[in-house]
Image: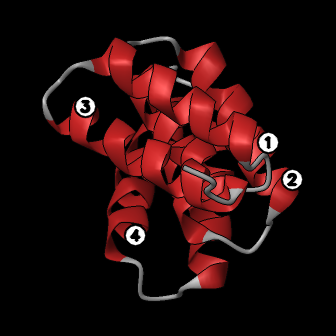
Amino acid sequence: LKIKDSIRSLVYNHRGMAYFALSDYLRAIRDFSRSINYDAANVRCYNNRALTFRVLKRHDRSLEDYDRSIALNPCQIDAFWGRAQTLYEMKLYSQSLADCEKALSLQSDFAPAQSLIRRLNKLIF
């Protein structure tokens, strides 16, 4: 079929999400990577792959994908929130706090970031 690359990117991203839901993380990463190959500006693919890397405890790769996603679109709460969680798992609390604050600057009532900030404040201060 002659399908636009942007559509192929969406298809691979959605199949990757299905694999993720089935806990087939390696196949999910493969499909998210294929999705990126077809549309390198699709921030959802980077965020989804970053989440998958975080689940696999491959934190450095997770951060790389969140960083790339944020570089492409610095106004998306999902990437800052995901990166905050990754940094928290890495015990990089002040960096995690900064990303939570950035997420809240984008959406002031974002309850998950508010909750993590309360936990971080107990750890840091």
Q: Residue 44 carries which label?
A: none
Look at mark 4 in the image and give the residue it sits on.
114
- Amino acid type at circle 2 is Ala
Considering the numbered disc 3 on the image, is that residue within a helix, a strand or a loop? helix
Left or right of 71 in this view: 46:
left
- Seen from this angle, which residue lies furthest right? 71
* Closer mark to the observer between disc 3 and disc 2: 3
* Closer mark to the observer between disc 1 and disc 4: 1
- Amino acid type at circle 4 is Gln
State whether residue 114 is above or below residue 12: below
Considering the numbered disc 4 on the image, is that residue within a helix, a strand or a loop? helix
Determine the residue positioned at 80% across, 66% down.
74
Q: Residue 71 carries which label?
A: 2
Regarding residue 93, the answer to whether it shows in the image is no
Instruction: Name the residue nearer the viewer: 97 or 14.
Output: 14
Look at mark 3 in the image and give the residue it sits on.
19
Q: Give how far apart the Cα atoms at labels 4 and 3 are.
A: 30 Å
Look at mark 1 in the image and give the residue it sits on.
68
Residue 108 image point, x, y percent: 52, 88
Lower sequence index among marks 2 and 4: 2
Lower sequence index among marks 3 and 1: 3
State whether residue 4 is above or below residue 50: below
